[in-house]
Image (tube, helix red, strand yellow):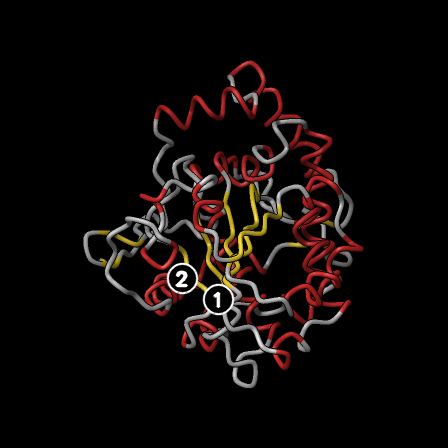
């Protein structure tokens, strides 16, 4: 599954749970989701893979691993095996990286340890009831904006998303994000700017080869309205409809997440020992060679396959 060819993946134990990149074949029930929602059946996928491979190969100026079928599927699944859409996603993905090369150049875990050290971002050890990965960003009490910049938070999220793109079940089921804004202050809110908001929205709407199925805002104080106002002008209806505000209403949150998927902080019953996001950092850093491989592809002058 990985571009660097590594097949042995590290793990770490958190209570009764094992943290790891899940590169196993999808479970039968997940394969059924792929069939129903993504048109993932042999008569469609075989033709689409060959067609898409040729399209990427012929894309001018693009250096990409088009001979790697697993890589092709990363872009075909979120576009339901429509090859024109998959090619557009590839173009957007690499053009976005090129446009924001100040963020993406040399983006590897070892250079972004700071955001993990401050425990601002984590992924829960259990998927939700629909098989989706749950990413939590704590941008209130846990976030010291004088020590961790918003760009560092963004880079940490990108590192998680790149890892999620490797996982077949996440490719199929997608991911959901919980923004915990508990304790957001005016000085923190002032860190958000229109250019930052536009970059995030452009990335989520057009440039992430991942099914982002929901963005849930919890524990937000009134001042969060000022932050969200920066994002609203750039949102199209599809993403806007997937942003849900819950405040401190846990019943509202549980309409979207089974309590068994959530820790006690969100009135859930997930019995997981407290763990620090540095645990995830160790796993991501252990496959740094994969991130280096990811960074080696893109639009390059005078470079042909």
Q: Left or right: 239 with respect to 214?
A: right
Q: Looking at the rendered structure, which numbered label has been put on residue 199?
A: none
Q: Nearer the viewer, residue 276 or 224?
A: 224
**Distance in Å between CA atoms under marks 1 and 2:** 20 Å
Residue 218 percent across, percent down from the top left: 51, 57
Q: How many marks?
A: 2
Q: Left or right: 240 with respect to 164?
A: right
Relative height, residue 263 to residue 104 (above, below): above
Residue 103 percent across, percent down from the top left: 65, 69
Residue 213 percent across, percent down from the top left: 56, 41
Rate crowding at label 2 as few (under 14), some (14 to 19) or many (20 or more) other CA atoms within 10 Å: many
Q: Identify the element where label 2 is drawn.
A: helix
Identity of the residue furthest to the left in this view? 16
Rate crowding at label 1 as few (under 14), some (14 to 19) or many (20 or more) other CA atoms within 10 Å: many
Q: Looking at the rendered structure, which numbered label has been put on residue 138?
A: 1
Residue 241 percent across, percent down from the top left: 66, 41
């Amino acid at each position: 599954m990985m571009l660097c060819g590594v097949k042995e993946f590290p793990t770490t134990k958190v209570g009764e749970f094992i943290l790891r990149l899940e590169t196993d074949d999808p479970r039968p029930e997940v394969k059924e989701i792929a069939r129903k929602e993504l048109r993932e059946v042999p008569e469609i996928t075989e033709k689409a893979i060959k067609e898409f491979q040729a399209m990427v190969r012929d894309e001018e100026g693009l250096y990409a691993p088009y001979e790697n079928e697993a890589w092709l599927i990363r872009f075909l699944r979120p576009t339901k095996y429509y090859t024109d859409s998959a090619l557009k996603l590839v173009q957007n993905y690499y053009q976005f990286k090129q446009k924001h090369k100040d963020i993406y150049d040399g983006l590897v875990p070892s250079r972004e340890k700071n955001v993990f050290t401050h425990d601002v971002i984590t992924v829960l050890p259990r998927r939700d009831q629909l098989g989706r990965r749950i990413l939590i960003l704590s941008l209130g009490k846990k976030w010291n904006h004088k020590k961790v910049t918003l760009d560092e938070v963004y880079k940490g999220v990108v590192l998680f998303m790149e890892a999620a793109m490797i996982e077949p079940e996440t490719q199929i089921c997608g991911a959901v994000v919980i923004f915990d804004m508990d304790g957001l202050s005016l000085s923190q809110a002032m860190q958000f700017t229109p250019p930052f908001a536009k970059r995030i929205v452009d990335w989520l709407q057009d440039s992430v080869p991942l099914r982002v199925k929901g963005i849930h805002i919890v524990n937000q104080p009134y001042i969060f309205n000022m932050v969200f106002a920066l994002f609203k002008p750039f949102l199209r209806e599809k993403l806007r409809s997937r942003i849900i505000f819950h405040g401190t209403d846990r019943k509202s949150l549980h309409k979207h997440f089974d309590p068994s998927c959530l820790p006690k902080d969100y009135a859930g019953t997930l019995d997981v020992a407290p763990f620090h996001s540095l645990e995830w950092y160790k796993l991501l850093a252990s496959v740094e060679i994969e991130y280096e491989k990811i960074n080696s592809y893109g639009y390059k002058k005078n470079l042909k396959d």
